[in-house]
Image (spheres, rainbow, N blue to C red):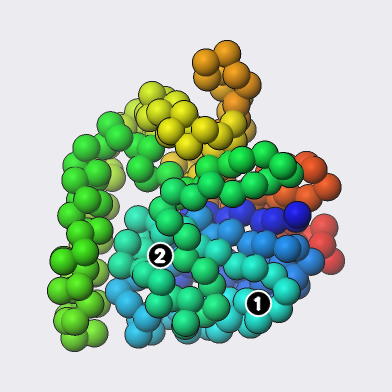
């Protein structure tokens, strides 16, 4: 199986080069892979529902739908920008919405994939916010609100979230090692793939005398590291480098 893993694109009208790079990826080299996994924070603005027309959402959704009707299987795991995204997204785009923590098989090895925000347990204020936002009753209430109201609520959250982020230390913003170990034990995996922290890299771990690995995807604000799985190899590569090599 060949697969691409991408996280933290934060696509917005303010960064048309990133939007173009994503569309170029979907319309070109992504078609040569069996699977594409989007591990959260696809858009810069908070997702407010399938009727969300905030630019560049419509053109990105169309590109996803065009890829999903090919032989490529496309999956998405919710990030902290998409907590309101649900299974109906599949009807809109053909993209399969996976549980926030999902186990897949890569080159015969079980791997846990997730956005990564749930690993940052030292940030207890965010974890409380996340718990509130994924409450089914609250989500049902938000989804019946008029579109304009939902947009205003989403935009109202941004300043507070930004202030909270600016006050956080690097330690709080990163994953908690004990939570990483707990999750890998819980799902009985030797490989964990996530984004969210904006700290791309490959971390070799020893859990209960077993060799394990944690791979962190990069954000598209900068280089935009994506994970490429093919020919039994895993490789982190910048999106522009990958697109250049694919030409």
Q: Residues within 10 Å of mark 2 (few under 14, many from 20)?
A: some
Q: Secondary structure at mark 2?
A: loop
Q: Is residue 156 left or right of residue 120?
A: left
- The numbered mark at residue 33 is none
Q: Quadrant of residue 5?
A: bottom right
Which of label 1 and label 2 is nearer to you?
1
Q: Residues within 10 Å of mark 1 (few under 14, many from 20)?
A: many
Q: Residue at x 19, y 86 (%)?
A: 146
Whether residue 176 is visible to the viewer of this picture, yes or no, is: yes
Distance Cα–Cα, label 1 vs label 2: 21 Å
Q: Secondary structure at mark 1?
A: helix
Q: Position of residue 79 (x, y in %)?
A: 40, 56
Whether residue 9 is visible to the viewer of this picture, yes or no, is: no
Q: Quadrant of residue 54?
A: bottom left
Residue under numbered circle 1: 67
Q: Is residue 150 left or right of residue 6?
A: left
Residue 164 sits above or below residue 17 on the image:
above
Q: Is residue 225 left or right of residue 32?
A: left
Q: Earlier in the sequence, mark 1 or mark 2?
A: 2
Residue 104 sits above or below residue 178 on the image:
below
Q: Residue at x 52, y 15 (%)?
A: 208
Quadrant for the C terminus, please: bottom right
Task: Choose between 195 and 107: the one closer to the eye.
Answer: 107
Say whether marks 1 and 2 touch (CB < 8 Å). Answer: no
Q: Position of residue 173 (x, y in %)?
A: 35, 37
Q: Position of residue 123 (x, y in %)?
A: 26, 37
- The numbered mark at residue 44 is 2
Q: Is residue 167 left or right of residue 1?
A: left
Task: Choose between 228 and 8: the one closer to the eye.
Answer: 228
Q: Residue at x 48, y 76 (%)?
A: 90
């Amino acid at each position: 199986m060949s697969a691409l893993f991408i996280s933290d694109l934060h696509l917005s009208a303010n960064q048309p080069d990133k939007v173009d790079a994503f569309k170029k990826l979907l319309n070109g080299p992504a078609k040569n892979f069996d699977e594409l996994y989007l591990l959260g924070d696809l858009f810069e603005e908070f997702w407010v529902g399938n009727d969300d027309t905030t630019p560049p959402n419509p053109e990105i959704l169309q590109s996803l739908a065009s890829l999903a009707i090919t032989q490529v299987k496309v999956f998405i795991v919710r990030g902290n920008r998409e907590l309101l995204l649900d299974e109906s997204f599949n009807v809109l785009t053909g993209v399969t919405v996976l549980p926030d923590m999902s186990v897949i098989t890569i080159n015969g090895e079980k791997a846990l994939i997730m956005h990564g925000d749930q690993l940052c347990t030292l940030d207890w204020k965010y974890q409380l916010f996340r718990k509130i936002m994924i409450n089914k009753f609250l989500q049902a209430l938000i989804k019946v609100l008029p579109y304009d109201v939902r947009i205003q609520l989403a935009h109202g959250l941004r300043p507070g979230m930004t202030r909270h982020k600016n006050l956080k230390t690097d330690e709080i913003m990163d994953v908690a090692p004990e939570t990483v170990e707990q999750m890998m034990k819980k799902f009985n995996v030797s490989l964990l793939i996530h984004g969210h922290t904006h700290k791309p890299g490959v971390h070799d771990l020893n859990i209960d005398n077993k060799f394990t690995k944690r791979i962190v995807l990069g954000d598209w604000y900068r280089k935009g590291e994506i994970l490429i799985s093919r020919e039994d190899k895993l490789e982190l590569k910048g999106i522009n480098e990958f697109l250049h090599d694919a030409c």
